[in-house]
Image (cartoon, coloured by chain):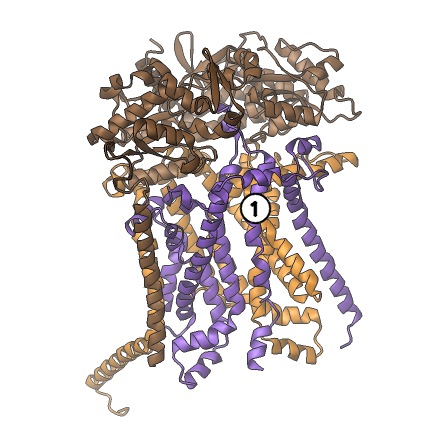
Chain colours: A orange, B purple, C brown
Amino acid sequence: MSNVSSQEQVSNLKGTITFERRFRFWKDIWRSRALYLMLLPGLIWYVIYKYLPMYGLIIAFKDYDIVGGLWNSPWSDPWNKYFLQFFNSPYFTEILGNTLLISIYKLIFGTLPPIFLAILFNECRSRWLKKWVQTISYMPHFLSWVIIYGIVIALLSETSGIVNHLLVNSGFKSIPFITSTDWFRSLLVGSDIWQNIGWGAIIYMAAMASIDNTLYEACRVDGGGRLRMIWHITLPGIQTTIVLLLILKIGHIMEGSFDQIYIMYNTQVYKVADIIDTWVYRTGLQQMNFSLASAVGLFKSLIGMILILIANRVAKIWGGSIW
Amino acid sequence: MVRGRSDRIFDIFIYVVLVLVAISAILPLLYVLSISLTPYSEVLKNGGFILFPKSITFDAYKELFADSVIPKAFWVTVFVTVVGSFINMVLTILMAYPLSRRKLRGRTFFLMIVVFTMLFSGGLIPTYLVVRDTGLMNTVWSMIVPSAIWTFNLLIMKSFFESLPEELHDSARIDGAGETTALIKLVLPLSIPSIMTVSLFYMVGHWNDFFSAVLYITNKELYPLQVIVRNLLLESSNLSQQTDVTLPTVTLQMAAVISASLPIILVYPFVQKHFTKGMLIGAIKG
Amino acid sequence: MKKQKWTLSALVSILSLSLVLGGCAQNESNNEGTPTASQEPTKTSEAQAAPTKLEITKVGWGTKLPDAGNDFIKQALDEKLNVDITLTSPASPDDFKSLLNTRIAAGDYPDIMELDSRATLQMLAEKGALLDLTPYLDRLGEVKTMVGDDSFKKGVFDGKTYAIAKTQALMTTSYYIRKDWLEKLKLEVPTTTEELLKVAKAFTEEDPDGNGKKDTFGISGLGWQAFAPVFGSLGVPSLDMATGVYIKDGKSITSPQDPNMKAALAEVKKFFDAGVVDPEIFSNKGTAASDKGIKGQVGIVFIDWGAFIRKEGAENVKAANPNAEWIMVPTIKGPAGQIEGPYDVGSTSGLIALSRTLEKDEEKLQKIFDLLNYVSSPEGSQLVQYGIKDKHFTTEGSKVKISELGAAEAGYIWLYQLTGRPESEYLATKFDYAAPIIDQASKLSRLNLYNGFIDLPSDFNAADAYRYIGDLSMEIVYGKKSIDSFDSLAGDLNSKFNYQVFMDQASKQMKELGFIQ
């Protein structure tokens, strides 16, 4: 076959290849039919409960009429009216900047502590200590932000907080943690780390539990120290988990954390703490302007999707990419 | 084995850090617990801060459990948590396993479909309509079925399945086992830590969920615990108009927080048992 | 292979089973009688028709409603009117709006809705979700007697009455001051702005609690509201109503336009300059301000009467410090007036609106009118205010006495006060020990604002404008900007925030409602 070179035969050959490809494609699918069947219930669920309601996105382009419903609401004029309302706010750049900054701070300072804690748990030789500290460090996750804010006030309030009490008694000046634009973001990031360090460590612990023990044995035989084992075995073992979580966090960078900020902020720190979601809440939802909320949501989602696509592409270098 | 000096120092370092973490987590919790056990006037006398109560009273807890509302809500929450998490896990595993197989055709497409829903959603109203039209309104299932899969957890599960060695599947194929058998006989036993973790995430999620109940449940018999606790915790600043409404005291609020989170906190020790370093693969290969 | 298929189908059938179960369970609970379920004859006596099911939705503010078996008000109303009431009370206005929004969009209208604000009414009425009550007003006789004509005005939108405003709650905020501190420092109750500043200074600097530390402050409260009487002494509303609409010289004016605003802010700034203000005044939330008062950290608090005078509050004050004594400060005088603070006459405690789907259900509509009239009638009103007669309260002539059981059990029943209550009489009965103070506080002179009547134009972003005014004013009082930067405020609002539209809307509606010529 290889020594014949007329065009006809080449095209014949191409035909055979496409046919074979197609054949292999269907054969592959038939061979993995069990896998597709497993996928089916989940996919059906996604279609019903996630994709059927997706038409709700059009409300971003409509003057929402609560009675007429989504379909009968008139199109907004101009079509991007609610996007413009957001972009044209004098505070647009500020809230966008705040949203990104707070998320990025949380990403930078919030990612490492749980990993660090998980490694310490993994290396801890006292089972008793390990068990107790794990359970205790995971408990703050169950406190809602209202309660955490109460604790923050009890600790850090300028007038009645324990910390400022101690500072003043030892001759220092009190620090306005809650009302100062210099401190507020640190407060947000700090309380977030406090709430989530133990909770965040769980997933890394699970990842470490599936690292092949023989790797450690081999390293020990080679005379490797514990730090070396952490560096060469433990960390690579949880690398894909770290990367996956990072991608997902990057995708949600525009989200901010409404619950936390809404409960903790005050008019004095708007300049550093007002994020997209709190602005939408004050502007739109209190007046039941759902179109605005939806338009801003769509904008955030688009940016998030782009960021995920980029992050996933980059992540392929290290492994742990989503697809 | 002889432990070196640096090894010792490392151990001490670990102990010190862990103890510090524990203290920083427990002091505020102790504060919550103490307030729930102290009369409010006592709290105020101490400037609002108490770590170790001088006089203990269980009044707040008595008040909380005075009628049948909270115990009833507790059982609703338990049902939703247990049954909901079971359904979550079945669906999540069934979906995560095929998606973890790199050779699966259309894998990227399916993953894109799934990830897309993490960022884009149709919003409250269309979701409400679907929940209603699938006949879930005013049933416990409205708190279970619409959240049957959490994409985040699905991706975690998928990632854990991916981290299993590829040879596993080869050996399964050589043994002539089908995919279902491979999943049940080989993959699942090796994935106990991740299954426990994802189950925990689901359980905690169901336990803390209140919003679906606010939207989909009007029958008060079916209110879960968090709806009731949240009602107690609402910021009361807007209440000045209703001068005769008796506000829940801080003591009662804290008692509610403790009662509502203790049961789910107690689940964790059962999960963490399975986090022993490298236990599983070693055992199976051995 | 066979085995594999079997397992698979088992998994699939488990899944479908769970879905089917979902469906079944739904049917069951429907039969048990949920509000949306169709009306089925129940086991009442044959002579009587089946009770009409009514669903009421309102913000519950976290009030714990007992289950139907223990809800004596529901039972009493059900029996009296042959209805079956379901009360859905989401805890917060946000939850309430989510619920209302989804339910209406889906066509599952609650029968009676107690709307939390004019904005909600505006949105629902505009889109035709509400029943136009205009033709039915003469069937709401008792309600009218109870709430008064003005309350019907608040529910007017586009010339039609869509809602009935509940009776208005009393405005009782004012300054409270530590009497024992005044005595210790040999000071008098302040009567002017200057004296207020002097006392606040003394409370901050002269160690009123005698602990040898400089750990007390002069004034606290919730944000700008804490200076309402100082603003009032210059005839302007405090800045927590940043775009307050009021009448000045026969014309409608909004607070940023008022030339006295700058002078008032300069007056307030004196307090900040003197360092007598709670440093967390703008971050105090909930009960933070009154808690500071109770803990003895501050000597003057602008707050509702309940904080220190109501039994629970007074007990806390005494528990923290047996010598502490709080008294009310009558309105202070200033160069341009003596006003305790702004009062939005258009605001309501709630707007009762009905679903437009009731239009075709004359029978149900009649039941609703019966219910509203009943809770407004002397008998029904007593029921929803105090509980069951001779059980939760007793009467001696026209005076009501609340029994111990009433005090213990009736904490939730305000939820059923659909049309409100005779406010002063109610408070005087319920809090007889505080009656003189409540009376005094409610009679203090206030500046009438009309914001509750004004619909926000869609091309004006009120939240942004509020923030701009708030930020600027805060920078001024904290000395980051000079007081003269306030001069450009009105212009900036127009150029950056489209403020003119709001002012036009305000004067237009004020004219329409006949408040100005």
Residue B18: give x, y in percent of width and height: 69, 57
Residue A259: give x, y in percent of width and height: 50, 42
Residue found 47% across the figure and 42% down from its top: B69
Number of marks drawn: 1
Residue found 76% across the figure and 77% down from its top: B1
Using the image as rendered, state which of residue C126 and residue A5 is in the foreground: C126
Circle 1 Cα neighbour tier, 10 Å, few/some/many (<14 / 14–19 / ≥20): some
Residue A10: give x, y in percent of width and height: 23, 84
Using the image as rendered, state which of residue A175 and residue A67 is in the foreground: A67
Residue B84: give x, y in percent of width and height: 43, 57
Using the image as rendered, state which of residue B7 and residue C409 is in the foreground: C409
SS assignment at label 1: helix
In the image, residue A12 above or below residue A66: below
Which quadrant holds residue A78?
Answer: top left
Q: Identity of the amino acid at label 1?
A: Ser
Q: Quadrant of the C terminus of chain B?
A: bottom right
In the image, residue C471 above or below residue C106: above
**Left or right of residue C341, residue C381 in this image:** left
Q: Which residue is mark 1?
A: B259
Chain of residue at mark 1: B
Q: Is residue B164 visible?
A: yes
Residue found 36% across the figure and 43% down from its top: A294
